Image (cartoon, rainbow, N blue to C red):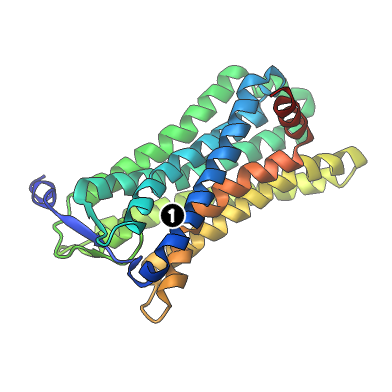
Amino acid sequence: MMCAMLNASFMFSLSGLEDTMNQRLPLFFLSLLCYFVILLVNIALILTIIVDKHLHEPMYIFLCNLCINGLYGTAGFYPKFFFDLLSSTHLISYSECLVQVFVIYSYAAGDFSILALMAYDRHVAICRPLEYLSIMTKERVAFLVCMSWVVPLCLEVVVILMTSMLELCGSHIDKPYCANWSIVKLSCTSTTTNNIVGFITILFYFCHYVFIICTYVTLVKTCLRSTEGKKKLMQTCLPHLLCLQNVSIALLFDLLYTRYGTQSVPQNLRNFMAVQFLAFPPILNPLIYGLNLSKVRNRLGGFLKTK
């Protein structure tokens, strides 16, 4: 507790944008456009699912939560990022830094939780169609959605509390935003416990990834047996797999960059690796589903025409 009180007066310096200040205006407008597209496509899909009662099915409810999670995560990054692009100093307070870490990484964990639910839903729908309605009841769907939010938030609370207990001997973060491992590396004391908890968290969500992949291996085998199964595979399963790989590759780059990155890698490349999971998945996920799921595409098209 004493360490947390001492750290409260810290101001972290974010040096990730120092080498890009000559291009900060083009970068600002490009990022602003990116954030605008994120807001547009996610809000459009969320409203379409909420307004249209025909889309009040488990798959679309999970998709709606995936979009909400994308808006939640990017809200923890873009406002501060815009401010830094227009400022000559890139400082962030200790408390604001911890809040940013909490939001960004609970968003990333939430993505995997929701994608795992979507894989489970598709497995039941395709492999056990006669039992689907009895398994995916409203109560169970509500419980699964709650858990997909509660578990990542609780895990991140534990991580943040442990980080806040560290006594820090530095204030320089070599990224355009706050990352937990970047703060931990500044500690004057042992970080063994933090490392163990960090690897357990990574392993926990790696198990989500393995579960999703194994589920889809089973789904592919089942779907290839019939023409209707192949159609379901292309319409609902392929978009889900694309979203999974999109998030996984982006997070893998960030993980490798944060823990094992070296100064020999150009700063611009390091910045790209650091922010891509906050830029690409929130845009591509709703687009992939909106363009591939005919039910969503038709409802969204009809909604726009009425306007």
Amino acid type, label 1: Ile
Q: Residue at x 38, y 38 (%)?
A: 153
Task: Check disc 1 and report the residue beneath it.
Answer: 202
Q: Position of residue 123 (x, y in %)?
A: 71, 37
Question: Of all residues shown, which one is farthest toward the bottom?
Answer: 264
Q: Position of residue 301 (x, y in %)?
A: 75, 31
Question: Nearest the camera: 151 or 306?
Answer: 306
- Residue 187 in the figure: left or right of residue 5: right
- Taking the image as drawn, is residue 211 in sight? no
- Taking the image as drawn, is residue 142 in sight? yes
Label 1's element? helix
Q: Residue at x 44, y 57 (%)?
A: 28
Q: Residue at x 42, y 40 (%)?
A: 152
Q: Quadrant of residue 231?
A: top right
Where does the C terminus fall, quadrant-wise? Answer: top right
Q: Residues within 10 Å of mark 1 (few under 14, many from 20)?
A: some
* 306 to 106, vertically: above or below: above
* 99 to 131, vertically: above or below: below
Question: Nearest the camera: 261 or 25?
Answer: 25
